[in-house]
Structures are given as C-alpha cells and as structure tokens.
Image (spheres, coloured by chain):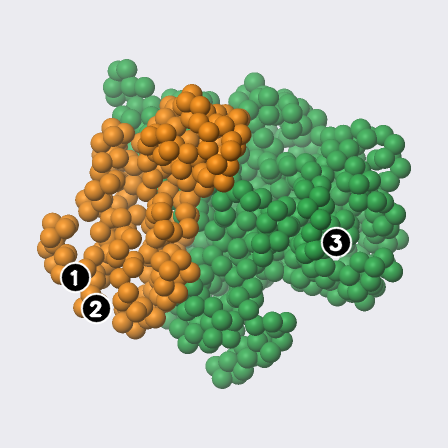
Amino acid sequence: MVTLYLDDIKVDVDENITILEAAEKVGIEIPTICFHERLTPPGLCRMCVVEVEGARVLLPSCITKVRDGMKVKTDSERVVRARRTILEMLAASTDISGAPELNEQIKEYSADIDRFKDSEKRTFPVKDDNPFYMRDYSKCILCERCVQVCSADIQFSYALTTAGRGYTNHITTFYDKKLPETSCVFCGNCVAVCPTNALIASNEYGNKTGDTK
Amino acid sequence: MNNTNEKKLEDFFNKLSERSRTHLLPTLLKAQELFGYISENTALRIGEVLKVPAADIYGVIEFYSLLYSKPTAETVIRVCTSPLCSLKGSDKIKKALLEKLDLQEGIPSTDGRFMVESVQCLGLCDHAPAAMVNNTTVCDLTENSIDDLINGTKSGPDNNTYSNHPVITKRFGKIDPLNIEDFIREGGFKGFAHALTFSKDELIYAVKSSGLKGRGGAAFPTGLKEQGVVQGNNSEAYVVCNADESEPGTFKDRIMMSRDPYSVLEGILITAYLIGAKKGYIYIRGEYQDAQVTFAKVIENAEKAGYLGDNIQGSGLSFNLEIRSGAGAYICGEETALFESIEGRRGIPRNKPPFPVESGLFGKPTIINNVETFSYLARIVSDKKKVILSPNALTPSGTKLFCLSGDIVRPGMYELPFGIKLNEVINDWGGGLEGGRAIKAIILGGASGSFVPREHWNIALDQETLRAAGLSMGSGVIMVFNETRDIRNILVDIGNFFYHESCGKCYPCQLGTQVQQEIISNIKRKGPGEDDFGRLEDVGLTMKDSSLCGLGQTASSAVLSAMVIWPELFRSTDKVGDN
C-alpha cells in the first residue's frame, strides 16, 4: 500500500495502480480520450495529464504509477489550460460531430471550438469499399485504437497502420488499398472501439452521424 | 535492369545476420537505393522475408522522409530549408533550380532524371545554404551555382574548427582521421587501456566526478546513466551512439566523426566494458553519408587491429559495433524513437518510464550517448590520475563544442571552456557580424532553443548560469541574426521545421506544431490578429507542459521566448485592451 494526495485528499491504494485508477477510487474524475480499459494505454492524447509535485512537466495519469507521498493536482491551472487547448485544437482539426464524449468534455472545460477556426481542417473523402463498414477519416482523432485492436492487442490481422508524420498522420492500409484487398477479416473490433464514429457500420451511417451517404 | 536489382535485393537478404524486423530500415534503404522507390511488390517481398506485416511496412515507409512509396528520380536534389539555410536564401536557390529544370517541388521530371525537394537541416549550417545531390553534399550555394547543384559537383565542407583549449579536438590536423595507428600514436585507446585497470565502481566514480553531462542537449549526468545500468547487473545490455544529429544549427558531431572518429569508438568501447555489452550500434542520420562511410572504415580497421570483435586486446571483452542509418526523421534523435527505429518501426518515442537504463533497445538495459559525450568520456578516462585525484580538475567537464552560425564572419565549430561569455564567442572567436552589422537576435540551443534577452548577451555559457536565466545551451548551438533580419521570418522557419518533424503521436505536439505554424505564418503575412498572443501562449504552454517527449516540449521555446522579448510583434494594435 502507498499513500498519496489527490487534490489534497489522502488516499491509500495498492502500489501497482495508476494515478487514473487511484482517482477513480476516490471519485475524482479525470477525462481521457485515447484510454480504453481493455487496451494497452498508448498515453498519446494527454487529456488525462495531472500536475505532480516535483515533476517538470504534466504527467499522463493513465500510465503514471502512484508513488508513496506523491502530491497530485488533477485540475490545476496548467492542467486545465492543457486540456482546454487540446480540445480546442482537436475541434479545429477534425469533425468531432460524431463524438459525444468529446463534446461533453468541450462543455465541461468551456473550450471554444472556434478558437482556432482559421486552422486547416483534416478532411478526407468517405471510404465506402466493403459491405460492412465505412471509414470517414475526417472524423478520425488518431487515438490509434483501431490500429491497436487490429494488431497485437486483439485480432492480429495487421490490416491497419498509421502513415504519414505529425499533423499529416492518418490511418490507412497497405498502400492505401481497399479493405477487401488487405488482411482485414471484418471482425468489427475497430468499429467497436472507435470513439468518434469515424468507423461506422454501413447500415448505421447517417443515423448516428446525421450525414447522408 | 530491374531483374538485376531484384537479384541484388535477394543478395542483400542472404547477407543478413538474421531475417527479422530489426533489419527493416536497412532493407528499405537498400531497396530505395536500388529501385528509387519501394513498390508494393518489393514491400511485400521484404515483409515476407523479415516477417513484418505488410501494413506496418507501409507505415514505416510513409514515416521516413528518405523512403518513398512512389517513384523518384535518378538524381534527387534536396535543398535545405531549415532556419539558417533559409536565412541565407535557400528558398531563392530552390526556386531558381526548379525553374531551370522546369519542375515542381517533389514531382520527378517526366524523363525520370531529376527531382527537387526541400530537406530539413543537413548539419551544414556553417556552410549555408547547403543541399544534397543524391549522396553528395554541396555547400555555400549561390544563385550562380545552380549548375553545381544539377551536376552534383562537390564543394566542401571544410570542417574547420577553432579552439584555444583543445581537449577533444586536440588530435584534429595531427592525424589522418581514418588511420588507426595515427590515433594510437596520439594517445588513442589510452582511455580504454586505463578503463581495463579500473573496477566498475572506480570507473563510474571517475566519470561522475568529472561532471560529464550528456552533450546531445539534455545534459543528463553520464556517470549516473552508467551507474543505472551497472547496478541492474544485467546479462544483456546495449551501448548505442546517437549520431542522429539533426538539431538546426548543430554540426559538431558530423565534424567530430569526420576528424577523430576513433575517439568516439573509444568512448563506446569503454562503456561496453563497463556494462558488459556485447553489441552496440551507432545510429547515424541518413543525410550524413560521409560519416557513414567513415565509420564503416573505422569499424573495419578496428576489427583488424583487435579493437572490435572477440577478446578485445586480451581484455576478455567481446564487442561488435553496427552502423544503422537513419532515414530522414529528426525525431529519431530522441533516444526511445531511435530504439524504435533500430527495431524496425516508425520512429515514435515511447512513454517514459521505463527509462533506457532499465528497458531500452530490444527491451534491454541500454546506455545511449551522443557522439561528443563518448569522445569526451574517452578523454576523461585516459587522464586517469587527474580524474581520480582531483575530481574537480575538469569540472564542469572542461570544454564544450559550440556550433556558431548565422550572420557571423567565421561560422564554425569551436571547442571552448564552459563559462566563456556569449559575446566573447560571437565577437572574439566568430569575428563579429558580417559587414560590421549590429546584432538583432541570438538563439541558444537551436530550433528547440530560445532567443536570448539582450541583458544576457554577455552571459557565461555554463549550464548552471544559463539555467538560472531560463536558458539552455542544448547541443551547443549559437545562432546569430543581424539587425536586418525579421524575427517573424525566423519563427516561420522554426515553425515549419517542427511541423515537418513532429512524429504526430501525442496530441499537443501533433496539433500544436500545426496551429503554431499557421498562426505565425498568418502574423507574418497580415499582422497579428486579435487573440493571437493568447492563442500562441496557450498552444505553446500546452506543448511545453503536456507533450510526450522533448521534441514537443521544446517546439514552442523559440516562439514563447520571442513573445517575451518582442511582445509587440504578436499583439494586435486594432483593439484597445487586447491581452
């Protein structure tokens, strides 16, 4: 057991858990985007960052283990600025209309989705290349869950990859091929874990997103 | 011809020590060299041989700037557009070149002979503007030297260096850099011989008490790293030399490797002995072809002379060193991204902890140091008595390699004692500014560094003093800009650099480098908008505070420091009470 302080609340927890898990135990809610309880946390969205006394930078609570005597602020000014700005930049880069959780977070952090409205959005034509599901990457926030489940986290099909670099990163297949021409087995795992409806069953497209096919 | 090349690729496979993923990048580079690009069929064949999923191979190709999934040309001309080359007019040269060849950037000519593209910092900032023509570097370009570019006529670099206190540059000029006997005659491998007489604790003590800190930019105490691995008592450990020098304004490792390469090898050997590593890698950036050729020769000669291989000099240490080439990605200078790259993946940094000393390359404890650090380490250990008896003799580690560039009379590499004054380096050593102009701005630390406020233009260049002033020397970069330069242009170039080099894994950096670059470009084009100061501040601080790795954490340093020194450049005057 270790003792740590979360927003000045004294908490006793097992030593092998993360700050995120410790916070959950005492009812402190820390927002997450890329985190999925069944997958290896990639620690990439940085939405769950917290301020740990003595640390130079903010730390991602989803992968940072608790330590005895740790003092954590889960909603300091720095933390809130980071979360709000991440949401504002995300809204500027991506169509998040199909992402209910993100929209809740935007409300909670009073993020101004027009803050960077002059920024160039990432837009792609909808990919409709198989009978089962469609890929609308204009809605993709690059959480990489789909690549994870398609690879070593669940399915071992290795049909998907991230390509490009930086802002031009995008999820695609081998040489951008149509899904039926790849190692995809249409297991549907990627659709199940997609948090923004960028991946959606073909017969649901439109109902969930308000878009027309 | 194609069939021949396919056969050559098969020959390459046959020569591999093992057919596994770690050879993916070398194989892709080989295929790129043979075919000019990597076709679907080639990628599938590589995947089959190295047992790598096809989609992953595509992801890797599309990550690295020197790999292409579409045909390129016989001659690819890459013009450096990083801050210093841009300052010296590389954009005009690129335009003139495109015009002369009647090409568009990044699109090969219809006859497949030429392609022109931009490249980020080639480490030739003392010879700006520079370019690469296939594997040949061309320096000090002017609009009149377009033909040299097209013909790939080699010009430089001269690699001149300056010092009044040479420690790791003291062999420069006295040896044929590739001649191992010259190196030994000038005291080479003395440090390694000394190390063999040390216990591990003594060796760590020697390094720790010397005050040596990492010279790649992060300044982590070298002795502490070593202690971390030795204490772990590992059966398998690696030594890696980080020669992925890509920070704009930095060219010291290139010069070090070209003028005293065995000293780097010696530092690597000492470290291998200390942690019991049997295998090491030197990861040299893809654009440093000359350094790769040099090191291949160095390894060959060292093997012949019994300084690599089995039972080195009768010490019982068996150690092999392998060169790995980068493929055009600044982020691979980040240690964990470099490991990913050696392991055959996209160069994406890992979350830390675990740190490399616990879990580094192939998940094993790893010591990774910069080129200069290894060379310095060899020097420290070779001076055994001094280090052991008087720990402060070289504190803080004596000298540093500084890279001076920009509007300066004598740009170049300078080995100078820590604590030397910034203005002394610029005026006394660098000869002041070209044309007798006044200084407008100084950046310390490269693109990821900061502008130095005027009151610190005479600051002492040592880590403690700089830290107290909120500055960092990083890898030792000093960029000087004269009074005619527009700060906004410099920031646009820096913004473009980070936009191009962010790996895109974490949101703050992936999105922040894009937004930062857009806002700065807009400010340059049409002046600051209403909330630009606040937006840049929020984006900059978010990147600094919450990015996953050092790239994102420093991608806004220059902008944030400029906002403190020249706030008026970022504030709109249209509206009263703005910010």
| Amino acid at dot 3 | Gly
| Amino acid at dot 2 | Asn
Find chain B in the image and tell me its colour. green
Residue tagged 1: A202
Q: Give residue B182's quadrant in the image.
A: bottom right
Measured in 3D between alpha carbons, the distance from the residue under mark 2 to the one under mark 3, in whole angstroms, is 54 Å
Q: Are marks 3 and 1 in contact (CB under 8 Å)?
A: no
**Mark sitting earlier along the chain (2/1):** 2
Local packing at callout 2 (Cα closer than 10 Å; few below 14, some 14-19, many 20+) is some
Determine the secondary structure under disc 3. Answer: loop
Measured in 3D between alpha carbons, the distance from the residue under mark 2 to the one under mark 1, in whole angstroms, is 9 Å
Local packing at callout 3 (Cα closer than 10 Å; few below 14, some 14-19, many 20+) is many
Residue B453 in the image, given as x and y percentages of width and height: 53, 22
Q: Residue at x 84, y 35 (%)?
A: B387
- Picture layout, residue B245 above or below residue B315: above
Q: Give residue A153's quadrant in the image.
A: bottom left
Which numbered disc covers residue A130?
Answer: 2
| Depth check, front residue: B274 or B373 | B274
Q: Do the residues labelled 2 and 1 touch (CB within 8 Å)?
A: yes
Determine the secondary structure under disc 2. Answer: loop
Q: Residue at x 69, y 52 (%)?
A: B234
Residue tagged 3: B276
Residue B495 in the image, given as x and y percentages of width and height: 42, 40
Parent chain of label 2: A
Q: Do the residues labelled 2 and 3 touch (CB within 8 Å)?
A: no
- Picture layout, residue B344 above or below residue A72: below
| Depth check, front residue: B118 or B151 | B118
- Picture layout, residue B324 above or below residue B409: below
Same subunit, labels 2 and 1: the answer reads yes
Q: Residue at x 67, y 54 (%)?
A: B237
